Image (cartoon, rainbow, N blue to C red):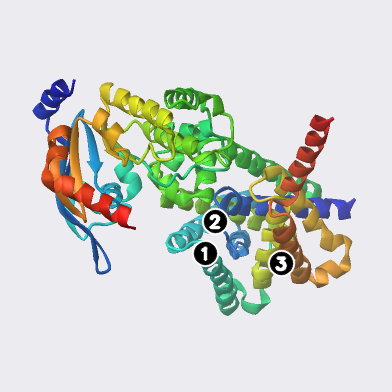
Amino acid sequence: MSAATGTAAGAAAPLLEVERVTVRFGGLTAIDEVSFAVRTGELLGLIGPNGAGKTTMLRAITGVVRPSAGQVRLQGQALGGLPIHERIRRGLALSQQLVRPLRSISLEENVALAAGRAKTVRPWRAITHVDAGPERARARRELERVGIAELAAQGAAKQPLGVLKRLEMARAHALDPRLLLLDEPLAGLNSKEARALADTIAEINRQGMTVVLIEHNLGEVLRICTRLVVLDNGRKIGEGEPRSVMADPVVRAAYLGTAAEAAHA
Amino acid sequence: MDYEITLLTGMAIAVMFALSLNLITGFCGQISLGHAAFQGVGAYAAAMLGKAGWPFLATLPAAMLLAGVLGVIVGLASLRVRDDFLAITTMGVVFLFVGVVRQQDVLGGELGISGIPDHGFGKLGFMLVAMLACVLVVLLSVHIRRAWMGRVFNGIAEDEDTMRVLGIDVPRYKLAAFAIGTALAGLSGAFLAYHLQFIGADNFGFIESITVLSMVVVGGIGSVPGVLVAAALLSALPAWFQFIGDYKLLVYGGLLFLMMRFSPEGMAGLVRRLRGAGAAREGAR
């Protein structure tokens, strides 16, 4: 399967290009001249030890943080300087690591709000459109996909983390992006739930969605990802087919190093 | 009968004014401590145009337009500030309004504008026109609440960063809220000018801004029926009790404080909670 996806993806131009992106916070360089490309149709795992700069990389792509150097291109168009909402409108969607549901409304309404993107593009459209039937139906399908359809009518305020992580992913997918960015969607889920959600991610990818996945659960990453990019200390230290990347001594050292430090602490 | 007509007209104007602020503060979550300035802009526009010979109904769109345009300008200036700073910025607007109007002889200066011409509807007719306008503002509020705009406003009020990630152009929606809310405040101002037939800068100062905010908060931020009832009742209070008129800032400021402290969701929240408690008790049986 991964070989088939590989050839299909290799033929197309990159969907997203990250070009020598550097992000500095004060004196700290969180990302140091990282470049990589996301090909149409692939499921790219962006991995690395804690503090490697994965989430910062995703934030630089979505525009939450502004890179101090470098450029991000979506389908050849430079995203630099565009506000977040404009990047989302151009085809990015982000499922955030720290869940941010709208707590005053139900799960279904949360997802429907994302599904209504065509009706919320301008205030004038938003004031002249009332009906949310199709968006609610879409929202229920998305919630079903991630396995929390039975909670659709409940408020988002009191849900456990596992539910909110899945809500976050359903909401991002409902935006109909060209590129779905998932920041640790499996965190907070038990192993059975994680496996089910990883299957869902793989299924979404098989249906044609290009996905970038940040995840600490390496088992699931190796199981579903078609390609990996490895970051450590803000630098790219590896890229390629999952098994060969994980066999790379530099990557192994980065992981074993942190494992040893963690054991030490 | 005259007394009741005057009272009801005043109530209709207050409800329009309070619902206009409810759009900005209640729906979209953007606090304003200077909303009376926009009612003032509408009132002065209508009064000046009326004295220049415009018929009353023709002054209404002009008042709305002018107040709305100024609202967008203030909105643009406020886009970069949130919460406490937005409160202070908007407070500045009302002081600016009063300060500028007082210095302009064209606008009547300290003396204000008197001799605003008759609207030509008669007292009863004017009350009915004001009530009709009020009903339209209520219907617009309810419509916005139900439309996609209401969903977006509600999301911005709760968490604007999340709304950006959902692809929402947050600044544009805030400006839309400011534009609609301040234009409706201008509309209420035009009615007020013709209702009072004499206006001065002090009719649209900080105290009035706090008064209308207390109507929104007491009614329940964002709740159309709650704000409607609260504005109608609170606007009539000074007519019923002399001392409330004398101690306006104390009474409305106090009310504002008490509601924020003990029932931040206003009367609407209180009713919901009582109903909820009742339902829970029913359920327990």
- Give residue A62's position: percent from left, percent from top: 30, 47
- Give residue B204's position: percent from left, percent from top: 65, 67
Q: Earlier in the sequence, mark 2 or mark 3?
A: 2
- Residue A146 in sight here: yes
- Mark 2 — residue? B30
- The label shown at residue B86 is 1
State the separation of the CA atoms marked 2 and 3: 31 Å
- What secondary structure is marked by label 3? strand
Q: Residues within 10 Å of mark 3 (few under 14, many from 20)?
A: some
- Give residue B1's position: percent from left, percent from top: 90, 50
Q: Nearer the viewer, mark 2 or mark 3?
A: 2
Q: State the residue in front, B4 or B154.
A: B154
Please determine whether, in this image, residue A35 is positioned above or below residue B252: above
- Mark 3 — residue? B198
Q: Is residue A155 left or right of residue B194?
A: left
Please determine whether, in this image, residue A35 is positioned above or below residue A218: below
